[in-house]
Amino acid sequence: MGPASRTTLTVNGREHTLTVDNRRVLLDLLREDLDLIGAKKGCDHGQCGACTVLVDGRRVNSCLLLAVTLDGSEVTTVEGLAGPDGEPHPLQRAFLERDAFQCGYCTPGQLCSAVGALAEAAAGHPSAVTGPGVRAGDPVPLGASEIRERMSGNLCRCGAYPRIVEAVEDVIP
Amino acid sequence: MRTFDYVRARTAEEATAAWAATPGARYLGGGTNLVDLMKLGVERPEALVDVSRLPLDTVEELPDGSLRVGATVRNSDLAAHPLVVEGWPALSRALLSGASGQLRNAATTGGNLLQRTRCPYFQDLSKPCNKREPGSGCGAREGVHRDHAVLGHSPHCVATHPSDMAVALAALDARVELRGTDGGRELAAEAFHRLPGDRPELDTELRPGELVTAVVLPAATRGLPSAYRKVRDRASYAFALASAAVVLSVADGVVAHVGIALGGVAHRPWRARRAEEALTGAAPTRAAFEHALELELSAAEPLRDNGYKVPLARSLTVDVLTRLAARHSG
Ligand SMILES: Cc1cc2nc3c(=O)[nH]c(=O)nc-3n(C[C@H](O)[C@H](O)[C@H](O)COP(=O)(O)OP(=O)(O)OC[C@H]3O[C@@H](n4cnc5c(N)ncnc54)[C@H](O)[C@@H]3O)c2cc1C
Ligand code: SF4
Ligand code: FES
Ligand code: FES
């Protein structure tokens, strides 16, 4: 192990204090140190979205985040999306009902990304396709083209995109 | 990845002092470019000074109506800021056209400005590249260079700067605030990035150890109609083949103020000064826009396989100008 730093992270509600090699990215920490293998390694370079998790409620690529930089943060992975009673998250239910995956490799990333994207739109974050009719700061109404643009950071090698868009549309508030 | 020490700075002073005290240190923002390049072995810092949690994460309106954006404001928050959306829309649009939602949530204003080129030879240790290894040659000049520069390149390097944000900042006359160990200074965004010349290893005018602390959007361009348009190989989540940020104001039927910067065509955002000069005081017609872009792009020197960028940059910029002009008449 190279130079390391003491780091405390809360992952899916559980606090962990670890001595982390400075080189460790969050994705490897989750998968290899904490046995949370939901987040996937696709490209390892920010290009596919398979590793998407939520850090302090915001979606990020865990393959490009050094774990030591996240001291004190709260991380939610796909394993933490379900309710306390094990009830699947509405998006997980929608993905099942719409058959929004084939091999499933991209799915944990798609789910975390969609949770983040819905929160961003509700908080008034525009996207590249948001029209001039939406007042700055107001919640952005979502339709298929907004969802496609906002989810463009998540590639699906199986091409399940149409169903993924439908599944996300199903849970628009 | 090679091992490195890690220091988290709490203030800008602490960051520059830590840099000065640590040989081989680099600043770390969101890490979306630096960590990527460290994995590839292109960047090999001996220490990282983490500046991502500096108290430079606010957007502050100054008394003169300008806006100071701290260096650690995340790209997604900057793009969504109501004062930016309303006052400098080209900046918001440029940010939103770049990368992905996840990456924008992590990327910082300072890191975005300092991201390195996406030239594939630069990212591949087995290939020659004067930017990565001065004197080793430029693989792209005679190799694969469809995405490379058509303006201002040199025999030493034909790379483009990848940032969309920086293109908007150049057009909007933004300024970049810097802080070194011996005090602060300011640069026009337009003069922040450089052309490759015979020093392609230098992307910017930043001095060793200088920290970007803020970007200032000037009152002079606040509220003027502005727009950003980007052309790329897919509809989203891809770098620009060519892009244009334009700010245009028309008074009494003639162009009162125009700022044009082109992206994806040069080693820095390309401020189209010749086109701007030709347009200032002229009637905002399509013919005038076409003439102005013709003038500007007469300086282009396309490589074997990227000649398409010249007509592309021309037509997309004329299109943005025409749409902005229509807003004035409509
Ligand atoms: C798959 C992918 C697609 C992308 N697509 C686009 C795109 O379409 N358009 C686009 O514009 N960008 C795109 N990007 C690039 C992205 O915008 C940059 O990676 C990001 O903006 C860098 O910001 P950061 O804070 O993560 O920088 P970091 O990676 O932390 O740092 C980048 C550089 O800046 C230096 N640095 C950081 N902060 C400071 C500071 N305050 N002062 C001085 N130096 C500093 C670091 O030392 C480093 O050299 C893409 C990236 C990926 C991975
Ligand atoms: S274009 Fe520049 S970055 Fe690309 S190989 Fe040539 S020297 Fe390197
Ligand atoms: S594994 Fe992180 S984006 Fe592909
Ligand atoms: S379901 Fe196979 S990659 Fe998306």
Image: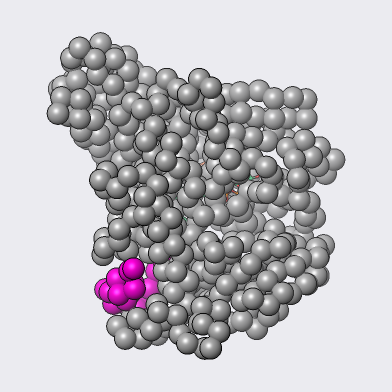
Q: Which quarter of the image is occupied by the C terminus of chain A?
A: bottom left
Answer above or below: position of B182 versus A162: above
Please state if B313 lies on the left or on the right of B36 as rendered: left
The image shows residue B11 at horizontal and vertical percentages of: 75, 40
Query: At 59% across and 57% down in the image, what residue appears?
Result: B36
Answer above or below: position of B9 versus A52: above
Answer above or below: position of A80 versus B95: below
- Give the farthest residue toward the bottom: A86
The range drawn in magenta is: A154-173
Query: At 51% across and 78% down in the image, what residue appears?
Result: A81
Question: Could you say which is closer to the camera, residue B278 or residue B169?
Answer: B169
The image shows residue A145 at horizontal and vertical percentages of: 26, 60
Query: At 54% across and 26% down in the image, what residue appears?
Result: B62
Magenta residue check for A169: yes
Magenta residue check for B79: no
Image coloring type: one colour
The image shows residue A142 at horizontal and vertical percentages of: 30, 61
Question: Could you say which is closer to the camera, residue A83 or residue B326?
Answer: A83
Q: Which quarter of the image is occupied by the N terminus of chain A?
A: bottom right
Say whether residue B94 is visible: no
The image shows residue A29 at horizontal and vertical percentages of: 67, 73
Query: At 30% across and 50% down in the image, what residue appears?
Result: A130
Please state if A115 lies on the left or on the right of B242 as rendered: right
Please state if A109 lies on the left or on the right of B232 as rendered: right
